[in-house]
Amino acid sequence: MKFSITPGNVKISGRTLYKDGIRFLGYPATYISFRFNGRRATASIISNPENFPAECHAWIAVYIDNGKVPAKRIELKDSRQEVLLYESPDTREVAITIMKYSEPEFAICGIEFIETDSDILLAPPGPKERRIQIIGDSIACGYGVEGLADRLEFRTSEENPSKAYSVLMAQILNADFEIVAWNGKGIITSYVGEEEDAVPDKSWLIPMLYKYTDAGCCRDYFKEPEEKWQLWEHSRFEPDIITIYLGTNDASYTRGIPVREEEFIKNYLDFLGYIHTKHPDAAILCMLGTMDQSLCPAASSAASIFKEKHPETNISYLKLPIQLEEDGTGTFWHPTYKTQQKAAELIAGHIKHMMGWQ
């Protein structure tokens, strides 16, 4: 029997657009989970691979029950395809998770329906006690975490958020999570290459993306003007703590120039203020450092200034250690799984201390 991708049928984790009966998974590690009693389950999934080179197709992972490792990873090569999620000769209770691995800059992933050999679905997995919102860039996406440093070519097949600090940290803390992250983006600029003039690219930044459910899908797939993009209803996910890992890409523009660093601090404070208005009871952890540490003092200053203005807010700053040569690097010098694991453990420990969690 076919089932729609709606609350009641499935658990929905992360920001998802629901249009024309299709559930679009946008940000990395956004997922749906469902349970049934049976032997077989499939999903009908749409994508737009014709608009991207093969290196930038959408990828999903399928998890069975509480598996830490996906049962399969699937490239969405067709505009519509039936994906076999699970098959067994024996009837049993099964929990299935479909997680998007690639990020919203590339091909889309829209789930039309799931189909099982059962007439009903069991109640979907329930919410966890802890909730974390994760705001970041490529490091949170797991960009290039399975790639090679000496191959300067990005492939979505080598992007894996389950090996990024974002998901790893949430797993350590046994928390539900929501990720808003996009590679190359920052607070005042996107990444500016060394060979380019230091002109900031302000067209597509995290503070703007944070306001919408999935701006990338609205703009690139539905071709909608900005005034029609779906605003995110922040009440749909009330986090206990919000982590912000931004500044690596901004540093490509600030380049140690004081006036630019002051601009970074000002805009960081503005972003913190907006976040605080949407989630006034949430703690906030600002952090930076794995790939570049030049803006660590500025990020720390922003957190300190915000604390002075809002003494009731539980806000902290964490400087992460720079990645080590012996731990390797992924595509375009991004952190490896080993580096991401180390960061996740440090972040989780800091959050436990902040929140009084065991």
Image: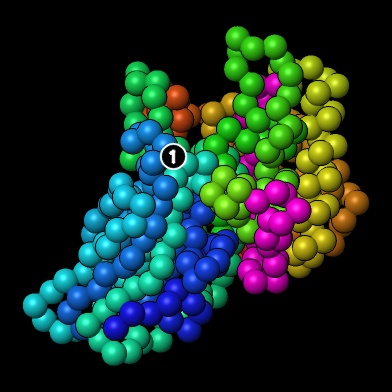
Task: Give the secondary structure at mark 1.
Answer: helix
Residue 248 is one of the magenta-drawn residues: yes
Q: Would residue 104 be seen by someone viewing this image from the given angle?
A: yes
- Tell me residue 355's x, y (percent): 64, 63
Magenta segment, which residues?
224-253
Q: Quadrant of residue 171?
A: bottom left
- Tell me residue 99's x, y (percent): 39, 59
Q: Quadrant of residue 189?
A: top right
- Work out whether 316 lies above or below 297: below
Residue labelled with disc 1: 51
- At x 8%, y 77%, the residue is 89
Q: Would residue 135 be seen by someone viewing this image from the given angle?
A: no
The amino acid type found where label 1 is placed reads Asn
- At x 48%, y 58%, the residue is 25
In this figure, which colouring scheme has been used for the structure?
Answer: rainbow
- Quarter of the image with the N terminus in it: bottom left
